[in-house]
Amino acid sequence: MKKENKNPVYFGLTNDIIFGWIMKSEENCLAIIRAILPELNITSIVHKEIHHDITPVASTRGVRFDAVVQDDQKRYYDIEMQVENTGDLGKRARYYQSQIDNETLMKGQTFHNTKESFVILLCAFDPFSHGLRRYQFHQYEDTIQDLRLDTYYMCYLSIQRGRKVKYQMIWQELSM
């Protein structure tokens, strides 16, 4: 006779296997990006890779992107799940951004060919302790905030740890 498990184990979005499985679906990737960045009006995904490794040269640090996605307007998205606050999200995002640029800007191309890209860090914690569900960062001139350096856009999204969110509720949680 099979014993009933009275304490089932919950594997949520922060579990690497579950996150990878969810991100394999084009529909899920599109829904997540649309929920986080609705102003971009993304209509489709033309390419995606799960657990994409980049190792530039043997002596430098590589990266393993959780999910790299390209949309119908040739914009790139690196979507990462962060479960531990190591205090280096800004530097991590900067490095991930540089690796996207390194992989998408080909030899001989000018910097005008640099692809628009976004680093999205889904956090299982509030990375800045301000209680926001979504943090957005741009590069501005310190005294003239209307003067924006056209480099990149980063978005941090905080998902509260310990909350058991049903799969169908994820999209609601992301868009809050």
Image: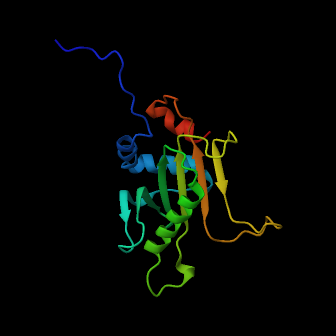
What is the quadrant of the N terminus in the image? top left
Give the residue at x 53% y 59%: 92
Residue at the left extreme of this rendering:
1
Residue at the bottom extreme of this rendering:
108
- Vertical side of 130 occupied by 95: above or below: below
Give the residue at x 52% y 65%: 95
What is the quadrant of the C terminus in the image? top right
- Vertical side of 98 occupied by 37: above or below: above
Position of residue 84 in the picture relative to residue 25 (left or right): right
Q: Position of residue 65 (x, y in %)?
A: 42, 58
Q: Position of residue 19 (x, y in %)?
A: 40, 44
Q: How is the image coloured?
A: rainbow
- Vertical side of 14 occupied by 33: above or below: below
Q: Quadrant of residue 46?
A: bottom left
Position of residue 18 in the picture relative to residue 73 (left or right): left
Q: Position of residue 6 (x, y in %)?
A: 34, 15
Along the line of sight, the residue nearer the viewer: 124 or 49: 124
Give the residue at x 57% y 61%: 91
